[in-house]
Each structure stands twice: as C-alpha cells, then as structure tokens.
Image (cartoon, rainbow, N blue to C red):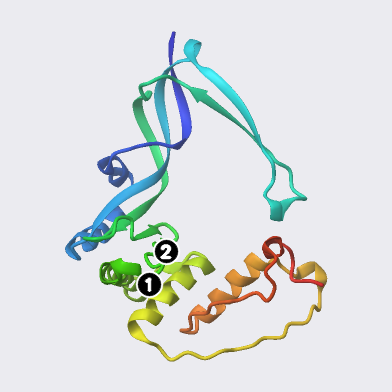
C-alpha cells in the first residue's frame, strides 16, 4: 500500500524548485553566466512529501563510530531504505533548507564550489596536484580559469574560504599567477590554559581566519609528520 510520507534530507530537485524558495540566489547565478561560466545547484537539503510503498521497503541499520579526533563522543546510527529502481514520486516540496553551487569554466568542470548561505568557498579544484608533466600548458590554462573564479568570489564577492585547505589552494594559485610578496613568520606558543587549547584543525582554521581578516593568506605547516597528531591537541 502506498503512503504519503514527510521526509527531510538531500533530494535531486530542479533549479526552478530551488529558486522558487530562494529567489535571492538569482542575481549571483546571473553574474556567473555573464562571466561565461556554468553552474550547477547541488547537495540540496529539503523537506518534501513523497509517495512510498512501505510494504516493499528494505531497511538497513548502520552504525558510524565517532571520528578519530572525536573519540570521546558517541557514534551515530543510520537507517537507510532500498526502494527499487525508480525514485519516489515527490508530491510536494515543503521547504528547501540549503544547497551548494558548483561553478565550472570552459575547460574545468567543478572548478569551485560555494555555500551561498554562509557566503563561503567550500572547495577549489587543485588542477596542479600531480604537477605539470607533458600536459603543462593545458593544465596552466585550466588553473588560470580556476584562479579567476576563486579570485572573483573571494576578492569581489567577499566570499570567505571555508577552511584552511581552501586558503592553501587559493594561496598556491595566487603564488603562481600574481607573484605576491611573501615572508615567513615563526610563532612559538605556550600553553596557558590546557582546557581551552583546541585541536590542530580548529587552531589552523582560527589562525587562517585571523590573518585573512588582515589581508594575509597563510599556509600553516606542522613540524612533525605524525598524521594522527593532526587530530590531537598541540600539547607535549
């Protein structure tokens, strides 16, 4: 028997559906098109009414342990449902909570991804991750296109890098194409209150934000090469 069920989660909704709930996004999307770039609305979180045949559902219960840097926290459980070869019929969209926008250029698909709600750059494609090799000129051209998108968002549209990884990718592109003045700053930190000391990831994010607010892009390098040390507090 089929039932109408209210669900919250990520759904593959059309662009018109999203813009109907969030018309404020239209000017930004139009600017992207005028730049000659393409965009795709992704990761749409919404609340919808769908039609499901509950008698034919196959449910799976999964347990996810806490992340390695959050070992003192509890894990979470997830119930997933297999519903067959066809997606459920969406009867009505009640709300669209959030979504991201992926921006592509002529030669680079998914060059940059943004969260328009937080006005953050979530991701910058690292075109030169494997170096230049024999395809160097094409990769440089692609990297230039990625840089132009990122620079437009960060400098003109005042989007913030979401984390230090985005800052580092943007800084590498800036170093490559703008040759900015650079200097090295060494900090020696002493623990004053052990209970307030954050983990490395949080500390890096805060420091990147601190310098970014002052017109500086920073690449932070941790001394040791212990991968698991990245998730621990910077304590002896």
Give SS at disc 1.
helix
- Quick one: label 2 or label 1, which is nearer the N terminus? 2
8 in relation to 194, above or below: above
Looking at the picture, tell me which residue is in the foreground, 232 or 156.
232
Closer-to-camera residue (100/84): 84
Residue behind mark 1: 154
Q: Is residue 193 left or right of residue 46?
A: right
Where the N terminus falls, by quadrant? top left
Q: CA distance from mark 2 to mark 1?
A: 8 Å
Residue 112, visible in the rendered structure: yes
Q: Seen in the image, is 192 located left or right of residue 10?
A: right
The residue shown at (81%, 71%) is 194
Q: Secondary structure at mark 2?
A: strand
Image mark for residue 121: 2
x%, y% of residue 159?
A: 40, 68
Decide: is 153 above or below 98.
Answer: below
Q: Quick one: quadrant of the C terminus? A: bottom right
Mark 2–mark 1 CB contact (< 8 Å): yes
Q: Residue at x 70, y 56 (%)?
A: 69
Percent position of residue 119, x then y = 41, 63
Viewer-proximal residue among 176 and 59: 176
Extreme residue toward the top, this view:
1
Residue 192, placed above or below residue 38: below
Residue at x 46%, y 22% (from the top left corner):
5
Q: Residues within 10 Å of mark 2 (few under 14, many from 20)?
A: many
- Location of residue 134 by image quarter: bottom left
Within 10 angstroms of label 1, few (less than 14), some, or many (20 or more) residues? some
Which corner quadrant of the image does residue 88 belong to?
top left
Q: Picture coordinates of residue 149 (x, y %)?
A: 30, 68
- Tell me where residue 37 sits by quadrant: bottom left
Identity of the residue drawn at 46% across and 27% down: 6
């Amino acid at each position: 028997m089929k039932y109408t069920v209210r669900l919250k989660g990520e759904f593959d909704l059309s662009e018109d559906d999203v813009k109907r709930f969030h018309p404020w996004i239209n000017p930004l999307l139009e600017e992207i098109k005028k730049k000659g770039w393409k965009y795709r609305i992704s990761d749409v979180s919404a609340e919808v009414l769908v039609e499901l045949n509950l008698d034919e559902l196959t449910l799976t219960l999964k347990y996810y342990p806490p992340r390695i840097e959050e070992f003192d926290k509890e894990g979470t459980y997830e119930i997933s449902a297999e519903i067959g070869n066809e997606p459920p019929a969406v009867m009505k969209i009640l709300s669209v909570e959030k979504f991201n926008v992926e921006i592509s250029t002529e030669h680079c698909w998914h060059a940059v991804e943004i969260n328009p709600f937080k006005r953050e750059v979530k991701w910058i494609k690292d075109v030169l991750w494997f170096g230049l090799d024999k395809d160097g000129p094409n990769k440089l051209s692609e990297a230039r296109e990625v840089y132009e998108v990122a620079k437009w968002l960060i400098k003109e549209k005042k989007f913030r890098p979401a984390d230090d990884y985005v800052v580092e990718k943007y800084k590498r592109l800036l170093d490559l194409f703008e040759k900015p003045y650079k200097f090295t700053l060494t900090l020696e930190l002493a623990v004053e209150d052990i209970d307030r000391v954050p983990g490395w990831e949080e500390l890096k994010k805060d420091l990147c934000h601190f310098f970014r607010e002052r017109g500086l892009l920073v690449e932070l390098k941790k001394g040791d090469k212990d991968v698991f040390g990245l998730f621990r507090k910077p304590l002896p």
